[in-house]
Amino acid sequence: PRPAPTALVTLSGYLRDAATGEPLIGATIYAKSLATGTTADERGFFSLRLPRGPHVITYTYLGYAPREETLTLTANQVSDVRLSSAGVQTAEVLVRARQADANVQSTEMGVSRLDLKTIRLVPALLGEVDVVRSLLLLPGVSTVGEGAGGFNVRGGGTDQNLVLMDEAPIYNSSHLFGLFSVFNPDAVRDLKLVKGGIPAQYGGRLASLLDVRLKEGDRQQLRTTGGIGLISSRLAVETPIVKDKASFIVAGRRSYGDLFLKLIPSLRDNAAYFYDLTAKASWQLGSKDQLFASGYLGRDVFNFGDAFRNSFGNRFATAGWQHTFSARLFGTVTATASQYDYRLGVPTGFNSFDWQSRIVSYGSKADLEYQLGPQSTLRFGAGVLRYEVEPSTVQPTDPASIFRPRKLPEQQAREYAAYLDHEWSATPQLSVRYGLRLTAFDYLGAGTAYDYTGPDGRQKTPVNPRGFGTGEVISRYANPEPRASLRYSLGETSSLKASYNRMAQYIHLISNTTASSPLDVWTPSTNNVKPERADQLALGYFRNFRQNAYEASVEVYGKRMDNQVDYIDGANILLNENLEADLLYGRGRAYGAEFYVKKNEGPFTGWLSYTLSRSERQVNGINNGNWYATKYDKTHNLALVGIYALAPRWTVSGTFNYSTGIAATVPDARFEHQGLVIPNTNGNVRNNYRVPAYHRLDLAATLQGRKGRGPRWAPAWESNWVFSLYNVYARRNAYSISFRQTPDRPAGTEAVRLSVFGTVIPAVTYNFSF
């Protein structure tokens, strides 16, 4: 007779930092006798199905002392596990962000993580540690240049990245036009960039997911961290509200360029600065419930006396409830509100005006996870997002202004989603994760819908107007989005992986500049602007060496995109009641190979990242209908990172970047008008030229202060000094190329190169904590 199946029970609980109570995301829980395990999620929660009886369980997390315990499981059991920091014992650096062999054993591919401790050691512009700029050192991630907002992933646009901060969407992740990001490193707990194999839980963008999780705050004691740099300062305070149960963190930053401007009489009426404030509170309500709330407020301000004023900023609020229904079922309910707005204007005079635009979204969703068995997990959920887009509003700011009040109609839309996702380890060698996301989108009234007629490549004429009442559906779309990923183990140190995902995107950023700017316009899908779709297939080989001290990977991908939005030459983006008349639609393709080698341990650590790729579009009315390079197409992209523990207190680091120059449109003709020679293009060519290659070397040195050598009132004081050099050999990298009449030869034209930084930039930053 067949033996009776062994009864299974569930071991679940939370893994937290023993000193602060912060959850340890990605910590490993391993049952030795069965050679099986799991990892803690973003809450630090874990759940593992095991047979009844004795088990030796080990808990490990990078930088923490491992813990081992023997348990005899007779029924479902909940454990609250605390791990203590292992401390720094040698002059070595660890640059892993997860357990040693996660890159080989997990089903994830196209996933990039950087440990925040590593990010702090890498050279940074003006000494400002930055999450997003650090991602540019990883394969498949690029930018069109210094001063460009956002980032590009595997041939996608900046608006094709889903950027989340505690589940709230961020519509512009940049400060100072892309020089810094909105993420305060003192408030960030964990970040993950997913370039392929995106789980069915996420959607709404074509290219990637950047998931940033904020700290919950120290639940044991008051903790303060901060830094003083040449361009800005920051301060973060964490404190328990109720010890071991509730905590709070608030972190703020502000640049002070405007304070220096006031010291110069001719510039004292000017201002250029940014600020942000990040906060989060969490409450543990017993062993089964946790509440959390977080928020962000940030803004950039640029004023040039009475000549020009510009400001833009993000704000969001998130509230959530996490509940354990049983030893096998748990879930999270989240509500978010997010806004991005941008303004520009002239405060006084005959041409005074105030122009503003904004996008607001309100969302709610529920995510649940059910443990089907020891190696089988089911995830499912649903959510809805409501969009309110205010394209353009203009108000005169002076009675003598030539401008008149004007407001384009507000746009309303709703996006719905439901998903089912199954992760299963079929055998010790084979693991799969597959799922389906179903999405729907309603473009709502009140408003007037038009059709457009005219030749491709020219401004079209609106015809057939149709009026719709408030809340009435103007157009409706739906898309099935299948996802799948697979890992086949070739042994303990290597594996093959494959992934496929289909993504749909219902909101679009309309831009006719080389780089994304705060003045680009968001628009929802309408009866004319169709939802963008992308299908991506990726294959990868992952291998670790010398007990995981080295890791390497090669990934190749191909992506096909439909309904890509472009624009006619001379398109008018601002204050255009018929913006769709200037838009064109086509298809895109992106393909490439990503190579990554990383040294994790020892006095010298670092990595090499290289991407070989293409990103192209084909749009009727542009380039005679032929394929052309996108503005963010870069054939070659290389990054080298080295970190060396020179002594117990000194660490030096360096980075080198090289990439193909961006694609740009240059004139191939000219005409003369009233004695002026004006460059022009024949036909509708697009991106027919490459600017010179981009390359840059940065260096940094970190001096760790002696512990306890701070003020008397802060005996636990820790500090460090960071000295950095950005653009060491003063390379004048081209940000853009423009053309003008030659000053000493009226009949000729010349190219003018614009460089954001054309010199070496030194910086000193002092960081502290107590």
Image (cartoon, rainbow, N blue to C red):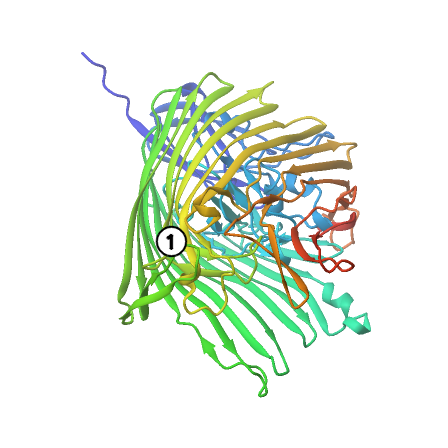
> Is 28 left, or right, of 438 in this rendering?
right
Quadrant housing residue 134: top right
Q: Is residue 470 above or below residue 625?
A: below
578 sits to left or right of 694:
left
* Residue depicted at 50% across the width and 45% down the height: 210
Q: Is residue 457 above or below residue 638?
A: below
Could you tell me the amino acid type at mark 1? Tyr
Q: Nearer the viewer, residue 189 or 443?
A: 443
**Mark 1 = which residue?**
506
Counting from the top left corner in percent of width and height, residue 399 is at: 57, 88
Among the 4 quarters of the image, the one containing residue 513: bottom right
Residue count near mark 1 (Cα–Cα under 10 Å), binned few <14, some 14–19, many ≥20: many
Instruction: Specify the quadrant that holds the N terminus.
Output: top left
Question: Which residue is drawn at the image coordinates 51% and 76% (left, top)?
Answer: 394
- Kindly give the residue lying farthest to the left in the view shown: 1
**Along the horizontal axis of the image, is 439 left or right of 305?**
left
